[in-house]
Image (spheres, rainbow, N blue to C red):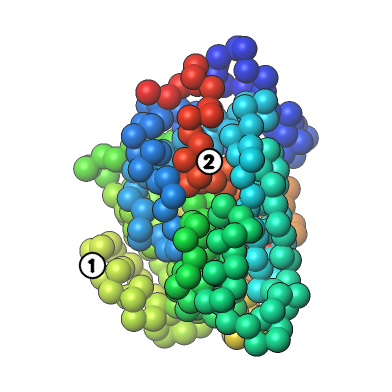
Amino acid sequence: MANHVKEDFKPNRLLEVLAPSDAESLHPEPGELLQRSVINLDIIRGLAFRNVIEVNQFSRQEVVELCKLASILEAVDIGPYNPLEDLIVITAFFEASTRTRTSFESAVLRLDGKIISIPDGQITGAKKGESLEDIGEMFNAYGDLVIMRHTETDAPERLMQNLRIPLINAGNGTGEHPTQAMADWYALLKWRPELAVNNPRKTEDLHLGVLGTPGSMRAVKSFVLMSLKFQEHLRKITFVSEMADPFGEVLKQEVEAAGIDYEITNDMNPTLPDMDIIYMNSIVHVGDDYKNMDRMFKLDKNSPLKEDAVILHPLARLAELDTSLDDTSHNLYWSQAHGAVFIRQALLTSVMGRYGRLPENLPIK
Ligand code: CP
């Protein structure tokens, strides 16, 4: 455990399980993020009772403070403080999920909250034609917060018509996946804590490669939008896609407005050896179904990667990310997936206004 964490806190027993000593994969230490500055509680306080729908409703500083809070929750055993005691969280998933629903539910339970779990929206009245607007009205009486995933992009807007408790968007069609982008950047900030520092001058010279089509892949889109907030650390973004226009209208405007150097290509080979961070994905949601896209951009342990390049993937993976990379130092994707529990704990504690339950002698000002 990092030496800044006071010794009367028990270390989180998960640390040993998540970072096995015999693995080559990267498991950056959570405490490093707090060595430069303590958490700014005013910023955390400002997140209380907010809906979480898209990346751009968050400032960079809010993301950094959430990541710092997550690093505390990862480092120490927070169970005895019961931050979500007496609160009920409804997880309503109208689309399949391994990680998002389970990590959110794990986060709630580890914070001593309670769960009403709807793992398949088709067991609700939606199967009989009930509207999301009416389902939202019902949820007001049943829980204190809703976490919803849906195949349709306008689903959060429809649920919120009558919802008076906070909503966290856990993925809406081809729209966004904002909490995935938080998990992505939590992994990156643990890997390189200096990226958390808002320095007007470039302090890093990182080349980001995006293997996939953000306009069709919500996790990739949210990751790119989040990455633009840290753009002074990025030298360039290379988008490797089978589509000539991989963005869609909104993202194109955002990337252009950011003024960052970027290129679009359908040939990863010339640029792959120069990339420092590689974000990849191949699953596209098409209505209630899925398709595999950009599948020709495959990586395995023999790919010509920079020695210290890291790979992120929101998962689930198909053939684009070979398992031969799992036990290499390029693998940041296990840390990215496991860390999702802690960033979601940080978000839930903040959105439910339960920061006051955190122990006083943590490094918080
Ligand atoms: N990253 C992600 O959204 O995974 P799931 O689809 O398993 O939730």
Q: Quadrant of residue 30?
A: top right
Disc 2, ligand 1: is the CB inside 8 Å? no
For this rendering, which residue is in front, 93 or 312?
93
Q: Which residue is mark 1?
A: 257
Q: Can residue 265 be seen by looking at this rendering?
A: no
- Point 34% across, 34% down: residue: 42
Q: Residues within 10 Å of mark 2 (few under 14, many from 20)?
A: many
- Name of the residue lying farthest toward the top: 7
- Point 66% across, 68% down: residue: 93
- Measured as percent of width and height from the top left, residue 359 is found at 54, 22
- Measured as percent of width and height from the top left, residue 260 is found at 27, 62
Mark in front: 2 vs 1: 2
Identify the element where label 1 is drawn. Answer: helix
- Numbered circle sitting on residue 29: none
Identify the element where label 2 is drawn. Answer: helix
Q: Which residue is mark 2?
A: 349
- Point 56% across, 54% down: residue: 145
- Point 64% across, 50% down: residue: 88
Q: Real-space Cα distance between discs 2 and 1?
A: 33 Å
Disc 1, ligand 1: is the CB inside 8 Å? no
For this rendering, which residue is in front, 234 or 226?
226
Three-letter amino acid code of the residue under disc 2: Thr
User: Would you place residue 275 above or below residue 45 in this image?
Assistant: below
Quadrant location, the N terminus? top right
For this rendering, which residue is in front, 162 or 294?
162
Q: Earlier in the sequence, mark 2 or mark 1?
A: 1
